[in-house]
Amino acid sequence: MSRRLLTIAGTLLFLVGGAAAQAPSPETMAVARKLVATTRLADQYRAQLPVILLTLKPVLVQDRPELERKYNSQTELIADVYRPFLNSMIDQMATVFASSFTVDEMKQIEAFYAQPAGQKLLQKWPALTQQSAQIGQDVGRKAADELKLRLSEVLR
């Protein structure tokens, strides 16, 4: 009896696992890519390039002016090298959206972000995230100080 139950459970897990591993449909991916575009995720990924270049520059140039000039002139090469990585990030994020939401849900999310309020949220999101993190740190520090005081009194 238990062997039969294990066989059924194993078969169900295999079927569920196989269904979860299926690639999203072309329609789903098209909607997901539109959502990626509307939420300006590609802009965020493009913004990573200057950070990467600033990190690489001192290592590659090593305070040599002739190499620095040559490095600075390689914008076409840099764009060509980075483009496949940018496209990969966009495709992977579209796949994450497609795997996380239904087509209808993605359309609703995209509709919100396409509106002025959604665009304003996207514009302000980095600052809001930073402020939220600061609030969490400040309040967490105050709570820790208060807990330390109260618990040290109780434990005496």
Image (tube, rainbow, N blue to C red):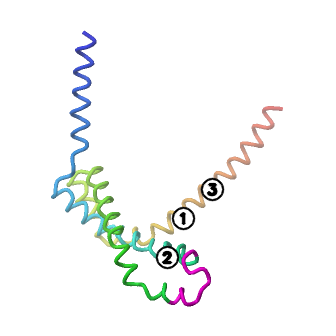
Q: How many labels, in total?
A: 3
Please name the predominant secondary structure of the magenta segment in the image.
helix
Element assignment for label 1: helix
What residue range appears in magenta?
59-69
Q: In which quarter of the image is residue 60?
A: bottom right
Tell me whether circle 3 and circle 1 mark residues in contact (CB < 8 Å): no
Q: Residue at x 58, y 89 (%)?
A: 65
Residue of label 3: 137
Q: Is residue 25 left or right of residue 108?
A: left
Q: Quadrant of residue 17?
A: top left
Percent position (x, y) of residue 129? 50, 63
- Quadrant housing the N terminus: top left
Percent position (x, y) of residue 132? 54, 60
Give me the C-alpha separation between circle 1 and circle 2.
24 Å
Residue of label 2: 53
In the image, residue 43 above or below residue 156: below
Of label 1 and label 2, which has the lower sequence position?
2
Residue of label 1: 130
Q: Which amino acid does label 1 sit on?
A: Gln
Q: Which of 80 and 96 is in front in this view?
A: 80
Q: Nearer the viewer, residue 145 or 33?
A: 33
Percent position (x, y) of residue 140? 64, 51
Is residue 118 visible in the rendered image? The answer is no
Q: Which amino acid does label 2 sit on?
A: Leu
Answer few, some or many: residues within 10 Å of disc 2's Cα (few below 14, many 20 plus, some between 14 and 19): some
